[in-house]
Image (cartoon, rainbow, N blue to C red):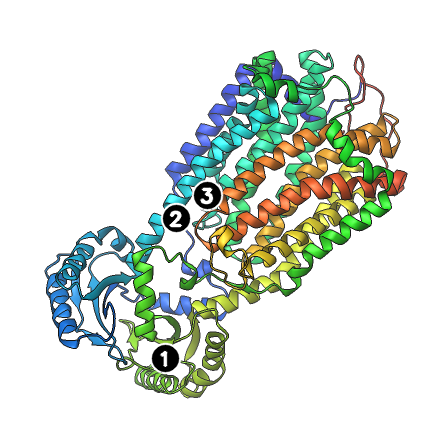
Amino acid sequence: MEKRPITVRVARWSAEHPWRAIALWVVFVAVCFVGGSMAGTVEATTRDYAIGESGRADIIANDGHFDNPAVESVLITARSGALDPDAAQRAAADVTAAMQALPDVAGVSPALPSHDKSALLVRVTLKGDPDTAPDRLAPLTAATAGVQDRYPGLRVEETGGPSISKAMDDTLGADFKRAEYLSLPVTFAILIVAFGALIAAGVPVLLALSSVAAALGLSTLASHLVPASDTTSSVILLIGMAVGVDYSLFYLRREREERAKGRAHLDAVEIAAETSGHAVVVSGIAVTIAMAGLFLAGDVVFASLALGSILVVLVAVLGSLTVLPALLAKLGRWIDRPRVPLLWRLTRPRTDDQGSRVWSALLRPALRRPAATLAVSVLALLALAGPALSMRLTSPGMEDLPRTTPAMQAYDRLVKAFPSNGTVHTVAVRVPAGQLDATKAALTRLAQRAAADPLFAPLDEAPDVRVSADGKVALLDVATPFEGRSDQARESLTRLRTQLVPQTLGGVPGAEAAVGGFVASDVDYADHVTHKLPIVMGFVLLLTFLVMTFTFRSVVVALTSIALNMLSAAASYGLVVLIFQGTWAEGILGFKSMDAVVSWLPLFLFVVLFGLSMDYHVFVVSRIREGVRRGLTTREAVAQGISGSAGVVTSAAVVMVAVFAIFASLSTIDMKQLGVGLAAAILLDATIIRAVVLPSLMTLLGSANWWAPRFLRPRPKPAHRGREVEGELVGVR
């Protein structure tokens, strides 16, 4: 008798020894989580994040070991009309006295008037670790509020890095808590609708949560090899819940279908393992390959996200193949309890292979007129993808943060009155031995030339050239009055890099200079992503083609898989551009358009979508292939395979869309774009792609779908003794 596939052997052992399998899984998750907590996380450093010239500037500045204390600014302006200078000076004196009396304050600068005399600025330098400054702001805020109460005719407000950071942490913290609180009940509710039974709905959520817990611990351990970024855990949660629920859905739905046909419990588990279990393995490999492409980006953030995503996907695959059969074995028919009466009647497994009548009706145009249906649907998706051709890339800046907090509102007034406190370029210089005075003189000339140029802000005070304690690094901030993403700000960066820096520091022998800051990072990172995107895409496409060809023993299936996923990704790009590079959706989604797409989004969106879309594609095409192996025509197999798998694919897609849509409700523009992009792409993939484009294309191709070179064609396999072969997949060994 031929050796059974590994997925079947593992599932059979787990089903026959359920308590052992469950105990091993619990121990595995606990060891991963506790071990990761004990090992601690290695965070990425400045050198890890460095990209382009702006990255070199950050490294030079970091090597100077400058003391960068936290600084708050107290701005005094008139509530209406012109500023009363006497009242403003008295208020500034009160601010100075109140701040100097606080134990956490290291110093207070003299009041600085703006050029147009519309404001006074008092800078407050804090003691201690700058990273903890946001947590120590309460006394400063109270002191500012006290001065405000004594001068009701003036506006006395506080802003600065610590207060903005605290405001954003509070806002984003509330956002993410809301997202976490909503995602689990929403997912559970959708699964109840999908299964009509509470236990069946709870099993996928339980497996997904345990997979996320294990992956978080493993990613902490892995950070000792690849440093972690601050977004890794969020992405693990996002991807882990998506694939964990998907894989459990595929497996559980198939096991229920087989039991409904009268299979013995163990036989149903084995068929689910051989079919859906195999699809889960292939899907996991496809997602892993897609995520591995991020390693080619040469970016620690992408590398960290790739590692975290790969770990959670592999853990979810392992859980679906091991502990899920054990849970099904122990629960038995209790998996369908307690039932929700109306929902159970609508969702209970069918005893035939005809699938959903609704989906059968939706498929009718694709099956009867495949050429016309394919042409119309592809043209519609290409039209949706069209706006992507005008995609512009940029990074979110201060102007993109929510303006709902007093700190951000005060920041806007501060920048208007004192432009040098807004967008700043940082010129970092590694000083050659014996050239410190020459370097300082060159930087002073640079600041004076820039101040005379309309692309730069005038000097509020003498140029501040900072020098490291060892005299080896010098820094100069050069401000521009324009927003960081504006054409003028980019032009000022170009002028600095190509003219002002070479003309001044070029005369200092051996000086190594680099220009950093937000604008420089924005430009350098967009260039970096634009350069790396084709490399990552090529890697993902090639390896996915090889995996799909080997899995289905068909070159045509592999090519159509890639083409459909590319079409889905392109359409999602177009939607993101259409929504976020214009202003028409600002009121609907609650954002301010940045007239561009976040720089990291296209690369990350591509690999995530390509990986997750393969979940559905592998599952659906596997069901179609099963029909072909049973002797159905391609048209019949397409109809039966898609309508029969529509329920689980739709349920999985609705879960993903709902979770991703929650992320679109967050305050920051990058999370909104990510949520909308993922939700739109999954929705398109599970509807238009799977219900229209795929069936029409496969119907047109007919038997050509399964063409492959002779060396790839599968050898005929004998039927397994005592059981039909209808559940087998091509490529299973």
Q: Which residue is mark 2?
A: 172
Q: Residues within 10 Å of mark 3 (few under 14, many from 20)?
A: many
Q: Is residue 485 visible?
A: yes
Q: Is residue 711 visible?
A: no
Along the polypeptide, which appears first: circle 3 or circle 2? 2
Marks 3, 2: nearer the viewer: 2
Q: Is residue 478 above or below residue 366?
A: below
Residue at 40%, 32% (x, y): give it: 34
State the residue in front, 672 or 553: 672
Q: Secondary structure at mark 3?
A: helix
User: Identity of the amino acid at label 3?
Assistant: Ser
Q: Is residue 419 above or below residue 133?
A: below
Left or right, residue 660 beside residue 360: left
The image quadrant of residue 574 is bottom right
Tag shown at residue 457:
1
Q: Residues within 10 Å of mark 2 (few under 14, many from 20)?
A: some
Q: Residues within 10 Å of mark 1 (few under 14, many from 20)?
A: many
Residue 672 locus on image (x, y percent): 50, 51
Which quadrant is home to the N terminus?
top right
Left or right, residue 488 beside residue 361: left
Q: Secondary structure at mark 2?
A: helix
Q: Is residue 344 above or below residue 38?
A: above
Q: Secondary structure at mark 1?
A: loop
Q: Which residue is mark 3?
A: 233
Marks 1, 3: nearer the viewer: 1
Residue at 58%, 26% (x, y): give it: 193
